[in-house]
Image (cartoon, grey):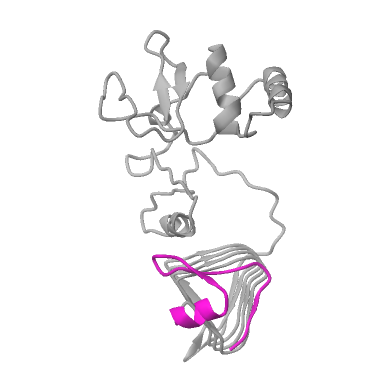
Amino acid sequence: MIDTDKERPGFIKAFLEKPTEPEGLPDSPHEVLASMGNYVASVGPLLEALKADAESATSKHDMGGDIVPHFVEQGTCGFYDFVDNDVPGSTDRDRNYWRDVGTMDSYYDAHMDLIAVQPVFNVYNHEWPLHQGLITEPPAKFIHSEEGRLGHAADSIVSPGVIVSGATVTGSVLSPGVRLHSWSTVSDSVLLDDVVINRHAQVHRAILDKNVIIEEGARVGIDRVSDLERGFTVTESGITVVPKGTVVTA
């Protein structure tokens, strides 16, 4: 939490680690400023602070616990209020969007925010584009249109390089290079890069890390007990998490 300096607006008086009774803001006593963990520093002073911290026997060598308080003590640490962040092209719905993705459930929820009809996590604002690395993947492709074997996706985000081959996708986020084979289903899930879902496999309410392979007929997120027995993490809300490179058999 950030205790603001009443005498110097915009500067931090104290940087408090999870206080039980923090002091409220001058203009809103029931609210406080919380650090989002984004820091901007001048290179020279930061290097000096890191060097001194490395030589300290009592430091925990933590950015929020040691380095930021160091600058606060020097009186050189200011803050930026996210409420004042006026993004061109934003709306009242998405202007102040923020999530702490410190848990698997909140990480999953952030992906679900992307696929809403009117997304609160809006990446379609052309006045404030989301810049990313060079994408060399081909466009996404949907193949097969016969009865019972229709390659399609609804209420989902499908990245470049994805091939949906006779599979059904609903309410999901598919990262680059994902391959979905015939008669497989993926629902309410997040698939990271180069995941392969083979024929007749089922994935529901799951996060599959990169290069996971779901073999023919295998199921993830359908049976909680089975997922736990296989060593997968299942969150409190029921999201099954499969680690990178895992091969899931039927």
> Which residues lie in the magenta part?
223-250
In the picture, the quarter occupied by the C terminus is bottom right
Residue 203 percent coordinates (x, y): 50, 78
- Place residue 193 in its image quadrant: bottom right
- Place residue 223 in its image quadrant: bottom left
Residue 12 percent coordinates (x, y): 46, 19
Q: Nearer the viewer, residue 152 or 115?
A: 115
Q: Is residue 178 left or right of residue 149?
A: right
Q: Is residue 43 left or right of residue 34?
A: right
Task: Please check the rendered image and state whether residue 246 is part of the magenta-colored stretch, yes or no.
Answer: yes
- Place residue 97 in its image quadrant: top left
Task: Please check the rendered image and state whether residue 142 is part of the magenta-colored stretch, yes or no.
Answer: no
In the picture, the quarter occupied by the N terminus is top left
**Would you place residue 11 above or below residue 247 in this image?**
above
Residue 197 percent coordinates (x, y): 60, 79
**Residue at x 53%, y 18% (from the top left corner):** 72
Q: Nearer the viewer, residue 243 or 74?
A: 74
**Residue at x 62%, y 23% (from the top left corner):** 41
Outermost residue on the top side: it is 7
